[in-house]
Image (cartoon, rainbow, N blue to C red):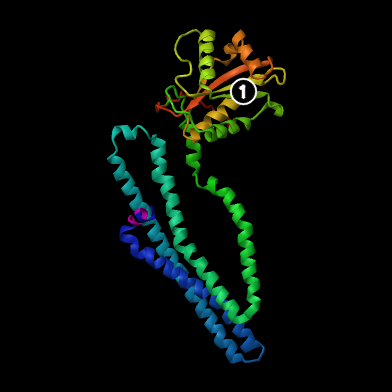
Amino acid sequence: MIKKLASHLGEYKRAALLTPMFSALEAVMDILLPTIMAFIIDLGIEKGDMNAIVKYGLLTFAVAAIALLLGVLAGKYAAEASTGFAGNLRDAMYENIQHYSFSNIDKFSTAGLVTRMTTDVTNLQNAFQMMERMCVRAPVHLVFALIMAFSIGGPLALILVGAVACQKATTTEQSDTTTDTMSMTTQEKMDIFLTRRSIRKYKPELPSQELLDKVLEAGTYAPSAMGKQSVTIVAVTNRSVRDQLSQLANKARGGEEDQFYGAPAVFVVLADKSLSSNYLQDGALVVGNMQNAAHALGLGTCWINAAKGIFELEEGQALLKEWGLESDLVGVACCIIGYPDECPEPAPRKEHYVIHID
């Protein structure tokens, strides 16, 4: 992957090589400054030697000026290399898209392709620039700081080593918790909601229990009126029970075809009407959470509005008893789930969907 990305540097390879060199030299200058300041104190002020003070003072000014110049050059070449890299990468992506077949194009939304060529490339550009500067400057700072510390303080420098180790230990755990979230761009997070579709054609294989559990967990964290948590989810992966529910849906709604469109699993969402007057709203929010979570994990879902009718039947009431559930539970929805075998296009959004009152 890195080799493939690096191939798009093109005519900006020189700038990409000069940036870390100038960054490393700038870091060396930064470390030399406190060392020269120590000479001013030890050899000039303490001994009352004005010549030493002037000499090392001028040297400090010269080193600071060189560090400033190196920093400016590193920034210039880093900007040149990163913007050039991003430009070449966008050109290559655009050229690649032109060779897509119609079947490949249909797999991507327009918003997704635009995001790939704008936000994602910009993130790569910023990451490349940071890598060119910080990934060189920081290690050089650390190495030369340790060298100077040991040369000046001897064993006392071990305190610095211990402090660095402790800082690393305390920040590793914090950084790990944010890595997954930061790896997604804002647009990618929004695409989860904007590209979700109701799926009515599924592959026969059952998703792994790990994926299903993640979707179910998302449902349990849906908003609930006054925190009553009136909803109960029955995850049906047993084929015979799933088929029985489909037959009951036919009986309740009328029809002969599979009401679940071949989906291998069904999440039955029930709500306790005695626990909350907002039980239907609670159930709807649970289904919405599960549908968005499933889409984020590469699964398809569809709301089947048959649960109420199913569990008003005697056979449905018998299933509730078999599952050890109370008869006060009302069917809200059957959320079918599985691997999608279609990619439907969204219907155009109606006009005046949103009305702003400023």
Q: Secondary structure at mark 1?
A: helix
Q: Give yes or no for residue 192 being in the magenta stretch.
A: no
Seen at 33% across and 56% down, the residue is 7
Q: Residues within 10 Å of mark 1 (few under 14, many from 20)?
A: many
Looking at the image, can residue 238 be seen? yes
Seen at 54% across and 78% down, the residue is 32
Looking at the image, can residue 356 be seen? no
In front of the other: 118 or 244: 244
In front of the other: 281 or 75: 281
- 213 shown above or below 6: above
- Quarter-of-image position of residue 315: top right
On the image, the x and y values in percent for residue 64 come to 52, 76
Mark 1 = which residue? 283
Seen at 60% across and 27% down, the residue is 286
Left-right relation of 184 to 6: right
Which residues, given as a range, are shown in magenta? Answer: 4-8
Seen at 49% across and 35% down, the residue is 297
- 240 shown above or below 7: above
Left-right relation of 323 to 13: right
In front of the other: 19 or 319: 319
Magenta span: predominant SS is helix
On the image, the x and y values in percent for residue 237 come to 53, 25
Q: Give yes or no for residue 7 being in the magenta stretch.
A: yes
Q: Amino acid at mark 1?
A: Gly
On the image, the x and y values in percent for residue 229 come to 68, 27
- 7 shown above or below 186: below
Indicate the quadrant containing the C terminus: top left, top right, bottom left or bottom right: top right
